[in-house]
Image (spheres, rainbow, N blue to C red):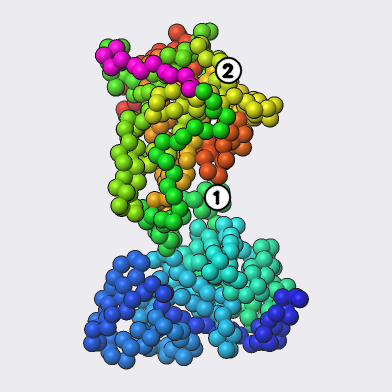
Amino acid sequence: MTVTEQLPPDLAAGGGPLRTLLRLRPEVVVTAQGDDLELSHPWGRQRVHALGADTVDRLAELTRTEVDLDELPAGGRLLHLLRRFPYLVTTTLADPLGVPLATAVPIARSAGLPGLGRSADTAVLSRFAYLRRLPEEHAGACVLESPTAPFRLTLHRPAAGAFVAAVTASRSVDEAALLAGLAPAAGRSLAGLLAGAGFLDDTAQGEPPLWDFHDLLFHARSRPGRHDYPSGGVFAHPEVAQLPAIPGTGPREEGAGIDLPVPDWDEVLARDPALSEVLEGRRSVRTYAERPVTLDQLGELLYRVARVRRVIPGDPADPHGYDIVDRPYPAGGATGELEVYLSVVRCEGLVPGVYRYDAAAHRLRPRPFSGPGDETAFRELMTAAWRATGCSVDPQVLLTVTSRFGRLSWKYSQIAYALTLKHVGVVYQTLYLVATAMGLAPCGLGSGDTDAAARALGLDWTAESSVGEFLIGSRPSDVPRTAHGFADMVTEARG
């Protein structure tokens, strides 16, 4: 059966224009107080005075049913009020019987009323737009979203999706309607809604040229302001068991592991430079001494940077309670999701291979290769690290920082991945400072091979995956460890 055969007569070729139906968002609560009312919604509350009882009643009715735009007087109070609060109004294109084709839902306060003007003769979809299906309870519908659009567009019928697919290349609206099996008038109405909602490439304004699709989407969705999804510590997955605060024995781990020496507090204080000397002397070092880094040095570095200092048990009676993990670096929610793995090529006192740092026991857990594929992945991982330095370093030890994502996403929505990347940045800085103070050669990497890391380390990349890479080696004697004064360009900049 073709798309056209599934359409009612009013949407197929030869039909008339679609109806435009307006309604308040489902979350809006209208509280009438005589001639006044209060609007409660996801962005706050508004009080509106002296509307008149009839307008108050009609607005309250819009929380339960739609109103046809053509039935609203152009200068009437109700339409004026809807235009005053457009971010609370959904706009639906529907056939004469009210069966919807597409609905524009505002997701940001910058949204206006879309689809009220005439569409252009040609259309092309924004390169930032994407289509996804809705959860099972909304089976049969999908949504069009874009980080540049202040709306989410629900496509209720296959023909709407077919029209969107037709305008992935620039073409006339009438041709796109024909390809989707829509009447020309219906296609123009849908194109107007797409344009008004911000999903078409506006050649006059242009699209942000310096953003990649995934970067702009990640930025827009991981911070409040350009979406209406619940964000922050909302505990959206109470039905899913929490991941343990301290991971247990992992795959390919056998035996007791390698206990690392615990640094002596007084010795560390006696030889550490001052903080300002370390901060000013911090740099990426991409050359190594002839003698490699030692096991004792790695142990001290890991202890000072990544160990678990304590676990504070959550209240078992609290459905939102979880175990707090205290580490040397700050972290949002203290979920302790980050782990550290070592890929060793040269280290005095340590056999080359892969190890997991057991941060609670301050111990290395060897992960022997289970076959040629694991060893190949290890080489790929080291090659990726070599390339990330501009092919300038033969790594001694690669630290791979991974995230057990579920420790964050069990509590946080929308911001979980952004939060784990913030934590990686904190770990990078802590590694730089401690390694510099210890006289080691630190170098943070900007990229790594996610797939090779998963295979080399024995991980399911969707549950725990690499999110940061950091090289550690022995520092050459001719590379200064610290600075003995501030370096700046203040005088030059002021001049």
Which residue, given by chain and number where applicable, does mark 2 sit on? 352
State which tag comes first along the sequence, 2 or 1. Answer: 1
At a point 27% along the width and 89% down the height, the residue shown is 52
Element assignment for label 1: helix
Could you tell me the amino acid type at mark 2? Pro
Q: Is 321 located above or below residue 404 in the figure?
A: below
User: What residue range appears in magenta?
Assistant: 256-268
Q: Which is more toward the observer, 34 or 400?
A: 400
Q: Which is more toward the observer, 353 or 428?
A: 353
In the rendered image, which quarter is residue 424 located in?
top left
Q: Is 79 located above or below residue 424 in the figure?
A: below
In this image, 198 relative to 241: left or right? right
At a point 39% along the width and 81% down the height, the residue shown is 63
At a point 43% along the width and 19% down the height, the residue shown is 259
In the rendered image, which quarter is residue 344 located in?
top right
Residue 137: where, in percent of width, then height? 53, 69
Could you tell me the amino acid type at mark 1? His
In this image, 174 relative to 67: left or right? right
Q: Which is more toward the observer, 434 or 50?
A: 434
Residue 43: where, in percent of width, then height? 34, 66
Mark linked to residue 469: none
Residue 189 visible within the image: yes
How crowded pointer 2 is (Cα within 10 Å; few <14, some 14-19, many 20+) is rated as some
At a point 30% along the width and 67% down the height, the residue shown is 44
Mark linked to residue 214: 1
